[in-house]
Amino acid sequence: MSVGIIATFGPSLNTIEVLRNIIKEGANIIRFNFSHADRDAFDKILNDLENLKKDGYKIKTLADLQGNRIRVRNIDNQIETKNNEVLKITNLNIKSSKSTISIDYPYTLSQIKKGNRIYIDDGNIELECIKEGDKEIDVYVKRGGIIKNRKGVNLPDSNLYFPTLNQHDINDLKYILSKNFDMIALSFVRNSNEISVIRKYIKNEEPKKYPIIISKIENKWAIRNLNSIIENSDGVMVARGDLGISLPLYKIPFFQKKIIKQAKEKSKFSIVATQIFESMVEHYRPTRAEISDLANAIEDGCNYIMFSAETAIGKYPIDTIRIAKSVIKYSLRYLKNES
């Protein structure tokens, strides 16, 4: 058994020297987050990686599609919301204000029912629908805070309509296929048919390289359809960030185990992602709890771990990989001796 390391590209990995060093320390795959795509920066790093491959370094590339993400919009500075307030949420493209928040969801809001929860900014702000509508709903602020422009919106109780492939992802896929990425991660997958649509699109494009397809498990519909999603994927990712908004946090460790186990049973690989060493964005060493989390993911049987902010914007990307590799090596040796 081996456990690979995926490092997310960002400003902290913007030189060939840093890339070379994280590969030396144990990074196997570089992830490109297309929610924050900078084509010029991507082109430069992809070129750097090709040069490193020519020098004998082994590294693969993963393109992580944005998927159907909803965001707040048209906020000039920031908006403060307070507990027990009543606000309006609209899909009309208007300027957001203290009383009305505009979101970039272009379809009817009628699927958001009374009592449904709405989270903003990774769950930091919690709202509840108290009045339904097509273009506008009223929400009660259960937990307030500061809303900044382009922050993400999650609606874990509402099975909203989305096209399987939106135009943003189509544009990105054309670029991804032209650059011969090794892997593509699909965000917010809800059923296996969505994977089939992506596979058909890729086949019709007749790329030089057919990328491996990874389904990110990050909502309760993916959990309900887990078996068929795993069967139609090459690998799955336990995307604990959004999954931890869709489901109660105390359930996440056990669904992580379930997803890894079912993937293994179907001979598919698994990735554990989100906040592996979150403290290393700012600090030189991870916490004891983070080390234990990583060791437990390895014991669960995951095939890869994935770093996001730690390597994209963190202060210590090389140390992040080095420490993770040492945990992996010891954990695998320990588990082998115990078996």
Image (cartoon, helix red, strand yellow):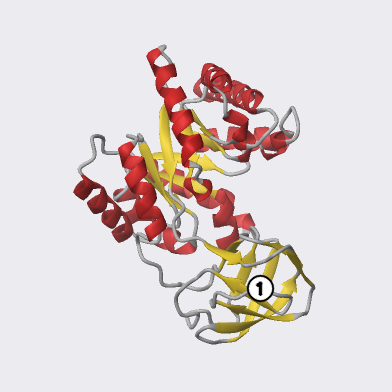
Residue 126 against residue 121 in the figure, above or below: below
Quarter assignment of residue 162: bottom left
User: Can residue 71 be seen at all in this image of the molecule?
Assistant: yes
Quarter assignment of residue 120: bottom right
Residue drawn at (67%, 36%) of the image: 290
Of residue 235 and residue 314, the one placed in the foreground of this image is 314
How crowded pointer 1 is (Cα within 10 Å; few <14, some 14-19, many 20+) is rated as many
Residue drawn at (35%, 49%) of the image: 230
Count of numbered labels shown in the rendering: 1
Residue drawn at (53%, 72%) of the image: 157
Quarter assignment of residue 214: top left
Residue 169 against residue 62 in the figure, above or below: below
In the image, taking residue 285 as reference, residue 200 lies left or right, namely left
| Residue at disc 1, secondary structure | loop
In the image, taking residue 91 as reference, residue 121 lies left or right, namely right
Q: For the residue marked with disc 1, what is the amino acid?
A: Ser
Residue 237 drawn at (x, y percent) = 46, 45
User: Can residue 1 be seen at all in this image of the molecule?
Assistant: no
Of residue 109 and residue 268, the one placed in the foreground of this image is 109
Residue 128 drawn at (x, y percent) = 65, 77
Residue 27 drawn at (x, y percent) = 51, 25
Q: Residue furthest top?
A: 55
Residue drawn at (70%, 36%) of the image: 281
Residue highlighted by disc 1: 96
Residue 239 drawn at (x, y percent) = 52, 49
Residue 333 against residue 156 in the figure, above or below: above
Residue 241 against residue 311 in the figure, above or below: below
In the image, taking residue 261 as reference, residue 192 lies left or right, namely left
